[in-house]
């Protein structure tokens, strides 16, 4: 059987967008090309002249913003991109053998399935996250959230195959479709190896936060936790990377607690500066309540930097951290609890950093995306010969 002709549909693309999902889909495209497939990556135009270089074709099907001022995806952009996908696929019903479609937002899946209705194309739905009804209402409001939840429930029944980024997302999917057999993508090898990583650190300890400054990241809760941790480690500082709608509130909280000299809001930084910050940090702290995977935890581990995350029903990053092996999972974001986890990670010092790097080495071999691609292709080929 020849290698399939593949389309991947997502409205963001790495490196123009630097989230975990974008990295997953780009690497998925690269691996499929390496295996002999032709791949078109359907996305929105974000470039003035040329698309970013890639080993696959990047096809813009729509152009527009997808977030509001608060960092929330807008319903109108979800409809617009889904409509663009429908219009793209409808006249190309025989062009692709396999389509991987991101369900963020889930309207993408409806658009692709409707356009390809009656065709033999094998559709893979990738679920970055699956939310209960209450979470949807909290995120998008009563009306929009309820509609999104119902679309999610129906969408779970539309694809030929499902992929997920974490075991708990897979378990949630099976609540709505008991016979589903989702593939949990191995994502650790999305992070490049750092052969020069060392457990040595500068004399002046600091923690690092990396991410968008939005409410779900709970960056503002890191500020009092730093103050608490400094009670035990007075020389501890923090470097905050990124920006977003929560940045002014975080800056105000820093000033309120008198931490202007101890917490630096670095903003967006270049790749090499980011690497240096992770390489020198005693611990990466990610207090987010919601992560589809938590790739930054793996990125830190490549440099032998442990992580502190916070347990929660929507936080897949907590699945990546083993207490005392590559960091600690705090039970809450309260200053006392989160601060104590930070102190423990810093005080564990070089032995914890050595265990963190060993964890990365082992996971990179056993939990890789290339094996997941093989599973997807095997399921596709099995369906084609029936």
Image (cartoon, rainbow, N blue to C red):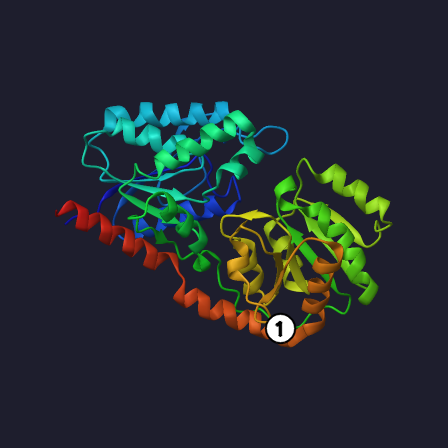
- Locate residue 170, reporting x and y percent: 40, 51
State the residue position of label 1: 352
State the residue lying farthest toward the bottom.
351
- Locate residue 148, reporting x and y percent: 46, 31
**Camera sees residue 50:** no
**Element under label 1?**
helix
Residue 203 sits in quarter: bottom right
Residue 370 left/right relative to 333: left
Tell me which residue sits at (75%, 55%) in the image: 335
Residue 351 left/right relative to 107: right
Tell me which residue sits at (34%, 28%) in the image: 111
- Locate residue 251, reporting x and y percent: 78, 42
Tell me which residue sits at (68%, 73%) in the image: 349
Q: Is 30 in front, or is 70? A: 70
Residue 302 left/right relative to 85: right
Residue 284 sits in quarter: bottom right
Residue neighbourhood size for the residue with mark 1, other residues' Cα within 10 Å, grouped as few (<14), some (14–19), many (≥20):
many
State the residue lying farthest toward the left.
386
**Camera sees residue 89:** yes
- Locate residue 382, reporting x and y percent: 18, 51
Q: Is 141 in front, or is 42? A: 141
- Tell how many labels: 1
Tell me which residue sits at (55%, 63%) in the image: 321
Residue 13 left/right relative to 227: left
């Amino acid at each position: 059987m020849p290698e399939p002709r593949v389309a991947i549909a997502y409205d963001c693309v790495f490196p123009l967008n630097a989230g975990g999902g974008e990295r997953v889909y780009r690497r998925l495209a690269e691996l499929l090309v390496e295996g002999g497939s032709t791949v078109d990556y359907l996305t929105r135009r974000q470039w003035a002249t040329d698309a970013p270089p890639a080993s696959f074709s990047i096809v813009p099907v729509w152009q527009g913003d997808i977030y509001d001022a608060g960092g929330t995806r807008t319903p109108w952009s979800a409809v617009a991109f889904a409509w663009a996908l429908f219009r793209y696929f409808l006249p190309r019903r025989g062009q692709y053998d396999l389509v991987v479609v991101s369900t963020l937002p889930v309207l993408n899946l409806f658009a692709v399935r409707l356009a390809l209705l009656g065709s033999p194309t094998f559709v893979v739905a990738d679920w970055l996250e699956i939310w209960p009804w209450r979470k949807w209402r909290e995120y998008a409001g009563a009306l929009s959230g309820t509609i999104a939840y119902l679309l999610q429930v129906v969408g779970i029944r539309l694809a030929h195959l499902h992929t997920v980024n974490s075991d708990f997302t897979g378990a949630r999917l099976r609540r709505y479709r008991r016979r589903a057999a989702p593939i949990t993508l191995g994502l650790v090898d999305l992070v490049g190896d750092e052969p020069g990583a060392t457990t040595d650190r500068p004399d002046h300890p600091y923690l690092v936060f990396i991410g968008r400054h939005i409410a779900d990241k709970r960056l503002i809760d890191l500020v009092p936790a730093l103050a608490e941790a400094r009670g035990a480690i007075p020389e501890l500082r923090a470097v905050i990377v990124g920006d977003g709608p929560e940045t002014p509130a975080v800056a105000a909280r820093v000033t309120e607690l008198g931490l202007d000299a101890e917490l630096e809001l670095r903003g967006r930084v270049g790749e090499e500066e980011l690497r240096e910050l992770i390489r020198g940090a005693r611990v990466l702290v990610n207090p987010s309540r919601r992560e589809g995977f938590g790739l930054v935890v793996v990125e830190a581990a490549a440099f032998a930097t442990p992580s502190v995350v916070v347990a929660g029903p929507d936080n897949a990053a907590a699945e990546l951290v083993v207490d005392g092996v590559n960091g600690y999972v705090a039970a809450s974001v309260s200053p006392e609890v989160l601060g104590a986890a930070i102190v423990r990670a810093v005080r564990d010092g070089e032995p914890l950093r050595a265990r963190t790097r060993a964890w990365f080495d082992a996971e990179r071999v056993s939990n890789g995306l290339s094996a997941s691609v093989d599973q997807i292709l095997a399921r596709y080929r099995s369906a084609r010969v029936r």
